[in-house]
Amino acid sequence: MSLERQELEDLKSKIGRDPTSTEVQIVAAEWSEHCSYKSSKKHLKMLPMTGPSVIFEKGYDSGVLDVGDGYVVTAHIESHNHPSAVEPYGGAATGVGGVIRDILSTGTRPIAIFNGLRFGNIEKDPQARWLFKNAVTGIADYGNCLGIPTIGGEVEFDECYSNYALVDVAAIGFGKKENLIKNHANKGDLVVLMGGSTGRDGIGGSQFASDSLETEDRSAVQIPDPFIEKLIIEAIMEARNLHLINAVKDLGGGGLSCAVSETADTMGIGIELDVDKVHTREPGMHPDEIMVSESQERMLIIIDKQKLKKLQDICKKFRVICSVIGHVTSGNLVHVKKGKKTFAKISAEIIANAQLLDRHSKKPAYLKSIQKEKKLDSITNYSKIMITLLSSPNIASKSWVYGQYDHEVGIRTVVKPGQDASVLRLDNGKFLSAKIDGNPKQCYINPREGAIGCFEEACRNVVCTGARPIGMLDHLQFGNPQDPEIFWTFLESLKGITDFAKFFQIPCIGGKVSLYNETSLGPIKPTPIIGVLGLIDNTPLIPKKINNSDCLVIIGNTKDELGGSEFYEYIHRFVGGNCPKVDFKESKRNMNSVLDIIKKGLIKVAHDCSKGGLAVAVSEICMTNKIGCKISLENVPGENLPPDRVLFSESHSRYLLVLDKKNLKPLENLLQKNKVSYNTIGRFEGNRIQFNVRKKSLIDLSVDKALKVWMNSLENLIIHG
Amino acid sequence: MKVGVVVFPGSNCDRDMFHVLTDVFNLDAQYFWHEKGLPKNIDAVVLPGGFSYGDRLRAGIIAAHSPIIKDIQKLAEKGVPILGVCNGFQILVESGLLPGVLLKNNSLKFMCQWTNLIVENNNTPFTCQFKLKEKIPIPIANGEGRYFVDDNTLKKLKQKNQIVFRYEKVVNGSSDKIAGVCNEDGNVVGMMPHPERAVESEINPIDNKPSSLIFESLLNTIGVEN
Amino acid sequence: MTLFTISVTIENKPGISDPEGETILNDLVLKGTYKTVSKIKTAKMLKFAIKEKDKTTAETKIRKICDDLRIYNPMVSKITINVI
Amino acid sequence: MTLFTISVTIENKPGISDPEGETILNDLVLKGTYKTVSKIKTAKMLKFAIKEKDKTTAETKIRKICDDLRIYNPMVSKITINVI
Ligand SMILES: Nc1ncnc2c1ncn2[C@@H]1O[C@H](COP(=O)(O)OP(=O)(O)O)[C@@H](O)[C@H]1O
Ligand SMILES: [Mg+2]
């Protein structure tokens, strides 16, 4: 690992001497993009981070929300893109491990995992298939072993991820407010390293994550050990219950260097440590290696001397190694020794505060031409197109994925994966709903509106379970920020997310920035991911059985917004067009109305319209309920559009509601009062999915056939692809 | 009435099981760490699911060497009801308390889904409240859940009425669709599916009644009025 | 005392199916252009480093460990021991 | 054409940890009375039956299959090929 020339000069002038090699290593780890956020930090400040239920504690790596009755929910999101692109199994698995430790370090028990997966074209590219399959197994093996349910996520394929992988993992924790660890430290406290041994694996990982994959430095492979992680979780929970911990931090990117310097800096203390005390996996490791190793499953704990024995007993019970590696000093120096010899002695403030940068930004040239629509081939057989869409990897059911994840363990999962958002029951009688969403196809065409769209979609998903959004996590994934055009897309996305968050008063409780997502084929499309948490005070909407003659109502306007849609990209192989835009006021009206309707118990099912548009959303309801539906497209509210556009436009803010017809009148009253645009567009009956325009049949499919294609095509692709 | 919930390093359904025993069925449950001994007067023992020792080498094998297993063996001989769920079943099999072996699912994948069980033996402490052939909707969640026995053992199992549960349909390729078995005396039962995940309506999308009978059978056996 | 490296290969007994081997064969190898492969069997290997006075003792000890600790399940698997 | 049996052993590269081997060693073998074992490494083995004109061709083909079909990931593992 190394510092750029400019940074080295900067460091020299700050410390007034030449740094030692260990100091350079420590600083390089901490000043890497991954750890320092040097390109993004100035801008991230624009996000609204506070709110009535947001709890802030110093030194936390995850956000904390008060959910009432003395309970809190914690949440965090991370990615493990570079490691997963070269070793999908270990990369994805250790990604789960990392985000879980962030949750753990607040003193809350992790209760759910989410994953967002993105790969190249799995229909054509065997490497993409291999990456996909192994990343899923990695997440499954890790989360399942921990006994933390993986309850939701998303999967997407796009050529822009060829030779690469985006593996995003989010986690949720839950606990009593009084059990939150309030990080503090006193002079003389001990610094303890707990967990797996330190080895040479993962050396240079955080810098690796800050380089694009072209560089052949691929030494940063990490081997997952979920069993140790599970024992660490239990040991920390026990130590927390006995109030043994003064402060705790997980070791992530940058290893010991970052954990120690960030802890020292945020708490205004000094830390003196001896690398000889670190339990290592292999003999003869150099202090530099020990300081930057990214070996997984390790936690740093600061503890009062008097309490050490108790912590050691707990660790012994769980057969987890814990080593006292140093102690807290006054002042703010990070002092690294090996025995008596000093290898680094440098102010934590200097290490932990890299020079923040002002990157240039410039609107990308491609955006000018991309909005123009090309002339599309006309479609003769819509039923056939529909089958093709239902089998497309982006739309096909993801049950092959979540069927490998234990999503029931913990016995909290009320709404299970396969619906819009998943719902967990909490100990205070309330329910937590969550979903993560991204949409690089739309973000590519319009980084700002695309990002807002992801945010709104995640909200919609949560709203469909009856939950009011209470917090958001963002994960901003882009290419090389030194490219002004890429940096512009980053800023646009961030601004869009900020605007939406402010308008809806949804605080951002955490996030992550991942840059340099590039391969020799170029940068990825802008890929912001938004996770939304929602709270349900009473009862969630658990989908109920649909019967013959139940009605289908749509809320929201369908507009000529097919840019980035599956219809354009998968059917017509066209990238471009009009990106869906969220009308904030309409969005809010619709959201509040759906919540009202659910609260009043008027509906059986709520489902949002997203990928594949109205046609796919209706089919999903039919397929999951094994019932047919007859839809009149001319009744769909919105712009007056040709039928293919009504079917496949991906306009936001739209919800499909299923209800018994006796509830139609009260529903209409409510919607009219709220000035929401809506209409009854269909009736459930029989076993065919039928879309008609003024009685003329456009699509006519048997539910069984649609279901078979939709359910099995992903698995078939992977097994027989 | 005391029910012991045995915890091994890596158990992860222990808390779920404990919650169900205590909060749902009002039993007096207590955790027992695998290095501890079990009291002689305990009324029943449950080995919950999870990944003891990370499923290394083979699911259940390392835990089967735990000190607590000797106590469980003694209690089993005395006729105390013992239930192993998922990893608990794997541990009972690997420690020789139950016949057979659990292999990787035919799909080679971890499988988490709801499925139907058929009660084949309603003469055990965990099934006595069922009707024979009663159907139980219940979730499975395992990677090594394919129960296997050779033909001779299978014949013996049938003769001695040791098959407790079968899957309604082929799920993972297990011998004769077996999902749960018992020892010859019937007091030690092992099953792959998770009854503790199916007894509360809130988290059970189908019907929570049948799985509850597993716990109600236990209540009935150890003499607690529900 | 000498340090020996001894490998223990655990594989299914004849007659016990090996879904993993079959899957690799059918869904991976035969899908491609490699038609000359007719069978794939999977096995697990453990390599022990053990200090004993001689090779035979080491080998005997390893066999005893495997039997005693049920490193393999005799109902479905068999082992082959090799001193490397 | 001759039928060859070729074993491919896939194991972690040196320096890459092997949590499974460590657990088997510490929680199973060393817990018992077998204190002379100092290390256990796990590996996976695939045994191929392949028909080729000679041993070298067979071996080359197998290596190519393992590389092409990503039977192992060279980032973490290495393979050893043996004609049995
Ligand atoms: N990688 C995954 N892991 C777990 N669940 C997933 C994954 N991908 C998709 N799902 C689940 O499948 C369902 C459909 O996902 P998605 O198409 O992203 O929904 P939506 O369009 O409503 O955002 C959701 O319940 C989601 O949680
Ligand atoms: Mg949705």
Image: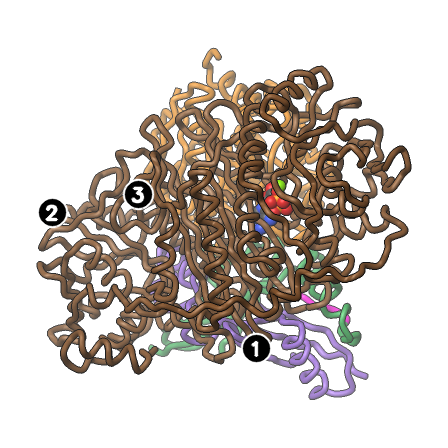
Chain colours: A brown, B orange, C green, D purple
* Of C65 and A569, the residue lying toward us: A569
Query: In the displayed structure, would residue B105 be above or below residue B167?
Result: below
Which residue is tagged 2? A306
Q: Do labels 1 and 3 share a chain?
A: yes
Left or right: where C14 falls relative to A525: right
Q: Gap in Å between the C-alphas at discs 2 and 1?
A: 55 Å
Task: Give coordinates of residue B74: x percent, y percent.
Answer: 42, 34
Dot 1 crowding, Cα within 10 Å, few <14, some 14–19, many 20+: few
Task: Find numbered disc 2 in the image and state the secondary structure of the residue it sits on.
Answer: helix
Q: Say which amino acid is labelled 3.
A: Gly
- Dot 3: chain letter: A
Query: In the displayed structure, would residue A134 be above or below residue A185?
Result: below
Task: Give coordinates of residue C57: x percent, y percent.
Answer: 42, 72
Which residue is tagged 3? A107
Q: Check if residue A688 falls in the magenta segment.
A: no
**Which stretch did the figure color magenta?**
C38-42
Q: Say which amino acid is labelled 1.
A: Ser
Can you tell me which quadrant of the image ligand 2 is in?
top right
Q: Gap in Å between the C-alphas at discs 2 and 3?
A: 20 Å
Query: In the displayed structure, would residue C37 be above or below residue A323?
Result: below
Dot 3 crowding, Cα within 10 Å, few <14, some 14–19, many 20+: many
Give the mark nearer the N terminus: 1 vs 3: 3
Q: Which residue is drawn at 74% across and 76% down?
A: D50
Give the mark nearer the N terminus: 2 vs 1: 2
For the question of whether residue B160 can be seen, the reply is: no
* Of A107 and B64, the residue lying toward us: A107
- Dot 2: chain letter: A
Which residue is tagged 1? A520
